[in-house]
Amino acid sequence: MNSLRNLVIVGGGTSGWMTAAALAKFLHPQQYQITLVESDAIGTVGVGEATVPHIRYFNEVLGIDENEFMKKTNATYKLGIEFSNWGKLGDAYIHPFGVYGQSRNDISFHHYWLKLQQLGDAGSISDYSVGVVAAAAEKFAYPASDPRSLFSKYSYAFHIDASLYAGFLRDYSIARGVKRIEGKIDQVNQRPDSESIQSVQLASGEILAGDLFIDCSGFRGLLINETLKTGFEDWSHWLPCDRAIAVPSAKTREPLPYTKAIARAAGWQWRIPLQSRTGNGQVYSSKYISDDEVANSLLTNLDGEPLANLNYLRFKTGRRVKCWNKNCVAIGLSSGFLEPLESTSIYLIQVAIMKLVEFFPYADMEAANTDEFNRDMANEYERIRDFLILHYHATARDDSAFWNYCRTMEIPQSLAYKMDLFREQGHVERYKRGMFLEPSWVAVYMGQGIFPKTYHPLVNAQEPAQLQQQLHAMRDTIIAGVRAMPGHAESIKRYCHGDTSEKSWPPAAMSLYGVFS
Amino acid sequence: MINSTDFQHTPIKRIAILGGGMTGWTVAAALANGLRGIGIDIVLIDNAQQTETDLHCEATMPACVAFHQWLGVTEKELVARTGASFLLATQFNAWADQQQQYFMPFGDHGFMLNRIEFPQYVIGRYLQGKPVNYDDYSLAAVAAKAGRFCHPSAQDTSLFSTLSYGLTLNTFAYFNYLRERAVQSGVAHVIAEASTLKLNSDGYIESITLNHIHGALANTPVASQWIGSDGLVAADFYIDCTGAQGNVIGKALHVEWQSLSGQLPVTHVINHVQPISQAQSIPSRRELLTGAAGWIQNLSSQTHTEQQYFYHSSFTSAEQARIAIGAAESAQAKPISIGRREKFWHKNCVAIGESAGNLDVQGAGKLHLVQSAILRFISLFPARMAADFNAAEYNRLTNLEYDHIEDFHSLHYQLAATQDTAYWQQLARVTLSDRLLHKLDLFKKRGLVAFYEGETFSSGVWTSLLLGNGFWPQRYDPLIHSTDAQWVELQLEKMEKMMRSAAEAMPTQSAYLYKQKFTAEIDIRSAANSN
């Protein structure tokens, strides 16, 4: 029935090996031949990488032991991201993988918190997030399994060494029949009639023919861009950072259970704690600052000795107009680029893989099927785009030309609408598909100084004194519960280096906020 | 005159609902419950001419179960007091062809195998030329076919936990029941004719003048609280439940009506109600069948059956339509205006019910849309009457909901457009939305249901509509071949057997109602008859 048979993945790295591993898991080895071609001469971008909780679902589906995964990838746990200096200089807040408090009477918690604030209670909304409180206290415990518990309403991800993850998945894939070919691609051959891709030719002269090609070649997009000339939607007027410099540094303290994102004069700096070292880097806009200035700033701000030379990266923010074009599916950086401010790179790889499996094609690449995949992926990109732009735009900073630009730039209509809606009465636009739901929007809005004019009037149905008492009790429960949690380093030691014969970790979900939220 | 800016920024303290009936009283009972504890007073003003008219029976979707729970209504009491029956599925007869019969259950068919959705395996079987009866894989469909019913099990390992159900209501008894509750929770009821609306300079409603105030109200607390000199009622927010005429949203605020009569072509409905005798069994399905110039819905509550013929007056006369369903000569056809308002929330007015839109009722009925509108309104309920962005969000979400329901309904016509009367031949030429065309294309090519935000119907329901009408895909998920074909065969056989024996273990609806003491209190029969 016109089935396809040969799949060729172009490029190793995180996206290539995640794709290979998932396809090896889902495709019957007698029906499909999966080949991955990668060149030892081409480096991958993989630095220290921060993830979101969805990666646990990917691992679960592949049947990967979480504790072994952590050991193999030098991983630490991650409960959220701390943003410093974004709303204004000196500010800091944590965007947790979890919800704030508990909704009551169908009204979300932040409305009650706003009322409490109006009553003169000065506490932060972060005090009502288990994820934030645990992160700040450098604790880590698995979420509770009782869905009624406050301690079930958060989730966790990891900081990993992405190149180790790629290696781990390479072993997984090869053990399941994926054929790995080392070599540099010299030439891409198209079919004369339909312009789709027929084969790739290696420097060695070897020709790899395929029915479906998966472009995991990174920024350059060897197939999707250089060969098929698929257009690119440029978003750099909204997200003007276009370069990054990365460097690992020596470990100086126990790793934090969260990522740091520190805003700088013309961009921001990440700090990703792994078990044995720290990943660092600055993302910046070359229009506003020179490479040298950033390099200096990066090195000055390291908290340990640099362990390698500086790695200079260039990119353009935006997305491929079609992630899937003809018989080529772009997965990873070849499909678009959004800076790693909210750790979405691996998530975007993962959803593309899951959608490729869901919309798995026949050899003729039926258009309706490809269109639906592209429509879905475009939506995923745009949801994240708006959320990232919010980080830059919701600021009072006027200390540099870069921040003046971001503060005053015109933003997408879809984001302006969401912000207006929130300002009016704290309502967050809801959707079923795409990342970042109400708790995340609330975290960034309030963390960066965007507050509603008023709260939902139904909040007033509760007596102020009673509300105050209940919220204080909730805060105390969280403090006490977090105090009882083991430290982050202790949890790593226990789960990752202890007796791992037993499955200790909780079930995973395609959610940022926990299995039960 | 009040300064208009101050007026618009006053907290909402008084709400006036215009129009009673099923819509008005559902809104009244729901707002009285949903907005309790924040000092809001509610009045409902109705008279016979300014209220949406209801047919005798109304079918709801499973969302009504959660709605009633939220409302604090005990289902057992509701069912017994109003003579409602339980509904598991819709049976379609003679849409795609004369012999066709299939069930559209609430809920999905079969179970996912090896992480691939169940319909893919059925499509695979069909394309291999093997016999397939899709209904056999749905417990709700098999049970509905045999007139059986039981409540879903709370134990999620039980097959019965996969059931979901709606209700078939006697509308008159239902809104009487809700009216009682609403009045008990403090909603004031004024029988009067609403006449002139006074707007301020920014177009917000300041007050409304009442005529022909019901005599019994004179000197009552309700009158003194709500009705000023000259019959003036001043509220902060107005809910228009006056039906298609849209007395407030349309006539006073001039929000336009967008007619869809070209797309969803029925112009009238005529109905025929008959009481059910004690000996008759009560079905757990509703039935939709095609007529020469439209389609017919058969509904059964515990006490009555009703045939409703939705037809187009260019293709049949009221008399022919009446005869087609065997209704009495006195039966009156009611005009239907298919369409929707350009906006649903405008200034300090929200239109709910037929004043907001009338989208046909094959899939989502009127009451479902009313309930969904109320929950949306409460979630966006504004602290001040001027709330432009909450209003915009309400309108955006309502438009999304309506768009997809329109698509769902027009698909019914489209798939049936093989009938040979002039009416159905004309339907075959109706243009479909791009959304629906893409949905049909993807389903045809791969058996997958395209996703849109804000849809009322799940992919499972879309799939049963498409497959039930013989709209089989040309291909299925190629990855089903990664699983051993014999094992899949065995699983399908097992599922079929499971559904059959589970349905056989269920009581008939009549026996269930009797045993569980859900049976209608006897006075419903006569009370409901008066409608």
Image (tube, coloured by chain):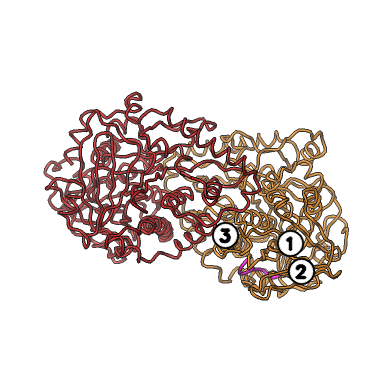
Chain colours: A orange, B red
Please give the residue where the numbered disc 3 appears in the rendered image. Answer: A376
Residue A482 location in percent, x, y? Answer: 68, 37
Please give the residue where the numbered disc 1 appears in the rendered image. Answer: A8
Give the residue type that dot 2 points to: Val
How far apart, in angstroms, are the residues tagged by discs 3 and 1? Answer: 23 Å
Q: Quick one: SS at disc 2? A: strand
Give the residue type that dot 1 points to: Val
Is residue A347 found inside the magenta-colored segment of the image? no
Front residue (pair B528, A11)? A11
The reply to whether dot 2 and dot 1 touch (C-beta < 8 Å) is yes
| Mark found first going from the N terminus, 3 or 2 | 2
Left or right of B335? Residue B496 is: right
The reply to whether dot 3 and dot 2 touch (C-beta < 8 Å) is no
Picture disc at residue A200: 2
The quarter of the rendered structure image containing the C terminus of chain A is: top right
Q: Quick one: SS at disc 3? A: helix
Residue A87 location in percent, x, y? Answer: 63, 60
Left or right of A515? Residue A497 is: right
Chain of the residue that carries numbered disc 2 in the rendered image: A
Main SS, magenta residues:
loop
Q: Quick one: SS at disc 1? A: strand
How far apart, in angstroms, are the residues tagged by discs 3 and 2? Answer: 28 Å
